[in-house]
Image: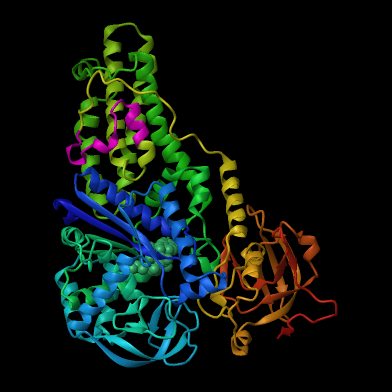
Amino acid sequence: METTKSAKFYITTPIYYVNARPHIGHTYTTMVCDAIARRHRLLGHDTFFLTGTDEHGQKIERSAAAAGKSPQQFADEISGEFRALWDRLGISYDKFIRTTSREHKRGTQEMFKLLEERGYIYKGSYSGQYCVFDELYVDVNTPGAPCPECGRPTETVREENYFFKLSAMEEPLLKLYTENPNFIRPETRRNEVIAFVRGGLRDLSVSRTTFQWGIPVPGDPAHVIYVWLDALCNYITAMGFGSPDAKDQAQFKHYWPADVHMVGKEIVRFHCVYWPAFLMAAGLPLPKGIVAHGWLLFEESKMSKSRGNIVRSETILEVLGADALRYFLMREIVFGQDGSFSFDALVQRYNADLANGLGNLASRTLSMITRYFKGEVPYPSHDLSRSTNPPLTDRAVFEVSLAETVISNFNAKFDEFNFSGALAEVWSLIAAVDKYIVENEPWTLAEKRDEESKARLATVLYNSAEALRIVTALAHPVIPDATARIWSQLGLGEIGKLRLQELKWGQLAIGTKLGKVEAVFPRADKSAIERMQQLEQEGRTQTPVAAPATAPAQPAAQPPASAAPAATAPQAAAANSESPTITIEDFMKIDLRVAQVKFAERVKGADKLLRLEIDLGGETRQIVAGIAKSYTPEQLIGRKIVVVANLAPRKLRGLESKGMLLAATLGDGEPVLAGFLEEVAPGAKLK
Ligand code: ME8
């Protein structure tokens, strides 16, 4: 990363919409940025880490209405949850920006005025399709046509709007991408953006009049500023752009441009096309780089509120702690690619790498020093080891060939955003030290009384402790809490004082007095998985479901079959008088049919799921439903049920579910299947 040379480093996460509660997808981006920010601080850089919430727009306005709250009250609550969660997870943000704050509103209006003054904004009329879920103008002509991004039906917008001359930015943008190969990373995203811009850019509508929840256009308050222009400005308004205060202006000048805007791959276009176009038009410096990561998948599809397949960070925090989640996300997911989350994989990684790996190395090394050398780092007698035919030459193993290679490889990989590779380097050193300890058997050396054995024991334990120090220093940005504890057990005080660029082999001072030795990662047993699954289930039933951004009739916004029992109760609560109305055409899109259960069985390893084979009137299908706690397979065979037959198929525990059964939900979350008193043939349509 070129930025490591500069004295300042400014990194941002996207600002998260407040229509949904935080889940581990949001946590992923935030934790990655946190680790990068922490590393830059340890490198002595003047670091600024920004995160926050995106609170305006039609989607939020509708969600608030569905929850029976004012948009501000609604935004305050969910924004507060994001912030509280980041605090619980130990996210070291320097500022949490809210787009409903006065400073942001003022700065965004200043940006709008600047664009207008520089001739990039004009008034025109817009007629076309809009996706409220993505807050995106969509290039399709048919009313109700699906959004190419998310598949939800678009809404027709006919308004007099302000337009931004995006078309004028085509050439400057292409020049920017060509001259700065690192402006968009990874390469695949860069290529997609270049192809998109080469395909031609049309002017962009940057105001709306049909709803109120936004920042008024300066001088024309019937219009609110387009939510993406509003949201993107957070990166500059948070630093003081648009403020009359000289201190704020100085801060903006100091930190802007950002070194890294970290985003999920679905919002690359907004950040790599619109944002630099706005900045160029305003005559402001451009960010140095936009880095896009892939999606966290759960049960094989993108974790998202509308799919109902989210995992909450609080669950993992409670059972395994924040470091376990941080380590898992950065080690297991290949950065830039999509990656799956599962509780099984989390616990496996936790046990293998943290409990048995780092945790074990720390406790065995530190306890042996405590026991054999009264808790003081012993003198490493390298030369003795040579003369006594040791199993391994200590100097060669650690000082040159391994520890220092690991340090330099780790640095290179981390700075290329290859976090998984960087951590694998560190864990290769842990594995080597483990092997070294086993082969040298310090416990046997300790039983011998001769001087030579004592000297070797000192060497082996010094080398182990020094390797532990290096591992701890490198891993600190990723697992800050446990490493801070190991650091102080090593007798080294406050880990924040470490300067990473000075880290090298041999700095552990002889005679350093160890602190109190305590285990940092207790082993997790199988009950940890069950506990997390149970907490998730409880969390799902408690989480109020915000209204879908679009009419709720389309399949993508429906809760999946497995979530049916959990999702129905809160949805029913939200669905009373505040539910948005839908047209008969919307309703007709749902293919509701009677089906007969031909076969039912429990899904192995999932105590809530049943696999059903159903007859839909000549067609046999498989669906997977989360009703195993209330119905046995035997109770279901032969029974008539109602299913949504045209729901997009999805996989649950590797099994394809083609449809969703309907059930009412009792107060305690128990599902009750919909059915008929009269005889109805399988396949009959409900309307
Ligand atoms: O898009 N996997 O907000 P948002 C990985 N407000 N990352 C995920 C994820 C998943 N399953 N789900 C969410 C918005 N994320 C706008 C941004 S910025 C000026 C405005 C993360 O609440 C990821 O970083 O939909 C993604 O880009 C972001 O949350 C989307 O958050």
Find residue 286 and report its image quarter: bottom left
Can you name the residue that lies furthest to the right here?
A: 678
User: In this picture, is 631 found above or below 676?
Assistant: above
Q: Position of residue 189 (x, y in %)?
A: 30, 70
Magenta highlight on residue 487: yes
- Say whether residue 442 is visible: no
Quarter of the figure with the C terminus:
bottom right
Which quarter of the rendered image does ligand 1 occupy?
bottom left
Q: Is residue 606 left or right of residue 233?
A: right
Q: Is residue 115 left or right of residue 160?
A: left
77 or 675: nearer the viewer: 77
385 or 597: nearer the viewer: 597
Q: Position of residue 491 (x, y in %)?
A: 30, 25
177 or 584: nearer the viewer: 584
Please report the residue visible at 15 percent of the width from the left and 51 percent of the height from the top: 7
User: In this picture, is 623 found above or below 632?
Assistant: below
Magenta highlight on residue 462: no
Please report the residue visible at 62 percent of the width from the left and 64 percent of the height from the top: 563
Q: Position of residue 530 (x, y in %)?
A: 60, 46
Identify the magenta region: 484-504
Please report the residue visible at 66 percent of the width from the left and 65 percent of the height from the top: 569
Name the colour scheme.
Answer: rainbow
Quarter of the figure with the N terminus:
bottom left
Q: Position of residue 424 (x, y in %)?
A: 33, 45
Count the numbered circles shown.
0
User: In this picture, is 231 found above or below 346?
Assistant: below
User: In this picture, is 51 found above or below 616?
Assistant: above
Q: Is residue 173 left or right of residue 521?
A: left
